[in-house]
Image (cartoon, grey):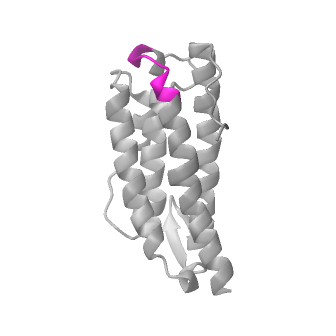
Amino acid sequence: MTDIARTFLDKSRHLLMSDYLPKLERCLEELSDEDLWWRPNEASNSIGNLMLHLTGNLREWIIGGVGQRAFVRVRQQEFDERSHLPGKELLARLGATLKEADDVLGRVDPESLLTRRQIQHDGVTVLEAIYHVVEHFGMHTGQIITLSKMRSGKDLRLWQP
């Protein structure tokens, strides 16, 4: 079980830091700060809002939930933000949060994956919390890629070696 658990933890860390983050960085290279806050309609989120949301989700689920570290999150503000924070600031916040989350994941004892945590009013296992975050991050990364292609009109070359 420990080998399977370690593989799960290593793959989760790899997806977050070495797959999803570089794709987000590539997207932001092609966009102006104005593009980051464009939304196709009021029912949709901007890339900026999604970046803030990913940062908040990591703080709550991995840093706070799995790592049991102190965190502050006002989830609705992630979606309400309209001040057009610069892309460099958004990436810096997300990058720092990912590094802290990676540190937490690097310290997870594989034997603790079935330990329960209280996150967002739900009792979940550490494994479920990590799985949720990786899936959630991947889903929003896909949205950011789509919005980036819509705004830039370019092939972002995300899957080339």
- Along the line of sight, which residue is nearer the eye, 82 or 121? 82
The location of residue 94, given as percent across then percent down, is: 40, 44
Classify residue 132 as left or right of residue 76.
right
Q: Against 77, is 46 above or below?
A: above
Give yes or no for residue 80 being in the magenta stretch: no
Classify residue 4 as left or right of residue 30.
right
Q: Is residue 25 visible?
A: yes
Q: Tell me what residue is drawn at x 43 percent, y 56 percent.
A: 60
Classify residue 61 as left or right of residue 15.
left
Q: Tell me what residue is drawn at x 50 percent, y 44 percent.
A: 21
Picture quadrant of residue 87: top left
Figure quadrant of the N terminus: bottom right
Main SS, magenta residues = helix
Q: Is residue 41 visible?
A: no
The location of residue 14, given as percent across then percent down, is: 56, 58
Q: Tell me what residue is drawn at x 39 percent, y 46 percent.
A: 95
User: In the displayed image of the protein, which residue is found farthest to the front?
Assistant: 161
Stretch in magenta: 27-34
The location of residue 128, given as percent across then percent down, is: 62, 67
- Along the line of sight, which residue is nearer the eye, 123 or 96? 96
Q: Tell me what residue is drawn at x 42 percent, y 14 percent.
A: 34
Picture quadrant of residue 161: top right
The location of residue 142, given as percent across then percent down, is: 64, 36
Q: Against 34, is 92 above or below?
A: below
Q: Against 8, is 131 above or below?
A: above
